Image (cartoon, rainbow, N blue to C red):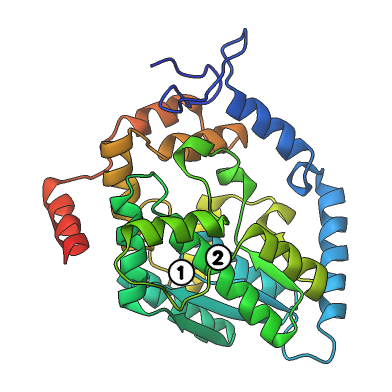
Amino acid sequence: MRICNRCIMDESDPNIVFDEKGYCNHCTNAITNLNNSVYGLDKDMKKEALRDLIGKIKKSGEGKDFDCIVGLSGGVDSSYTLYLLKKWGLRPLAVHADNHWNSKEADENIENLVRMLEVPLVHEKVDWNEFKDMQLAFLRSSTPDSEVPSDNLIFAILYKIAKKHGINYIMAGYNSASESILPKAWSQGHFDKRYIKTIHKQFGKLSKVSFPIISNFDRILYKKLYHIQVIKTLDYIDYNKEEAKQFIQDNFAWKDYGRKHGESIYTKIFQEFILPRKFGYDKRKAHYSSLIIAGQMNRGDALELIAEPLYKSDDDLKKDINLLCE
């Protein structure tokens, strides 16, 4: 397959386009988007933007128990985000959307962080039979979107709890440095309620589910009626994931779970086995390409890493497949 001369995206994305230099549309668009966002501001302007943001958040929280909310998965990005919020003098409410697929390391990370940082935690657990039926419906539908139910659930719960407590700011552990590139063909429809419900109606066994499903229209209403907005928190600092990981390991007994999004057992199985085996999509290509564009990874190193197998051993793969099928 043809591969980009600047990042490592290739024709496993059916919609990729290359220019005369051999650069792909993904890294070209990522560079433009990064330069036109908070992430692309120079150091002084970014500090000023952060001061303004903190001031707005504190003002919005006057007279309330909390001034912001953060989804906590136990992963690097959300864990470091929670630390930053406390460092900035904010009063966050941590929320964990539990879909029953947490790794042991993720659970321990969440417990240690909220205890050591003294942050209240809302642990929102969905009905297992219902969520299992939704995930099975997506697997039966043979779309590459099996992560959509989990991603949608997280934000549906965050918006619901933000509204309940009158919180105006959802501080997302999103960082453009490692997430600026992701082909739409590999996953989409994260906030398409009709799509999610149609997949479940056609391929699920239950007539309905009780957990919330949120649409893009719902998100607009939350913003217009309740003034709730999502902030890409990590774009306001010079974020380096490896440095952040080392910091939380040293200071909060944080435990590593392996690859990106490995805090969820289901995500690990889907991204490292089902997605590449069935559809030919290896999300490491997008992740490493994002890091290359951000100047945090060398292209040669990325090509070497991408050549390594996703699963280190057949025994690990068999164990995870058996766990998925239970």
Percent coordinates x, y for residue 91 in the rendering? 71, 82
Q: Mark 2 sits on what residue? A: 78
Q: Mark 1 sits on what residue? A: 74
Q: Nearer the viewer, residue 67 or 135?
A: 135
- CA gap between label 2 and label 1 equals 7 Å
Q: Quadrant of residue 312?
A: top left
Percent coordinates x, y for residue 14 in the rendering? 46, 25
Q: Residue at x 60, y 41 (%)?
A: 180
Q: Quadrant of residue 186?
A: top left
Rendered-image quadrant of the C terminus: bottom left
Residue type at the position of mark 1: Gly
**Neighbour class for label 2 at 10 Å: few (<14), some, many (≥20)?**
many
Q: Is residue 11 above or below residue 311?
A: above
Residue type at the position of mark 2: Ser
Judging from the image, what secondary structure is the residue with disc 1 in? loop
Percent coordinates x, y for residue 242 in the rendering? 50, 51
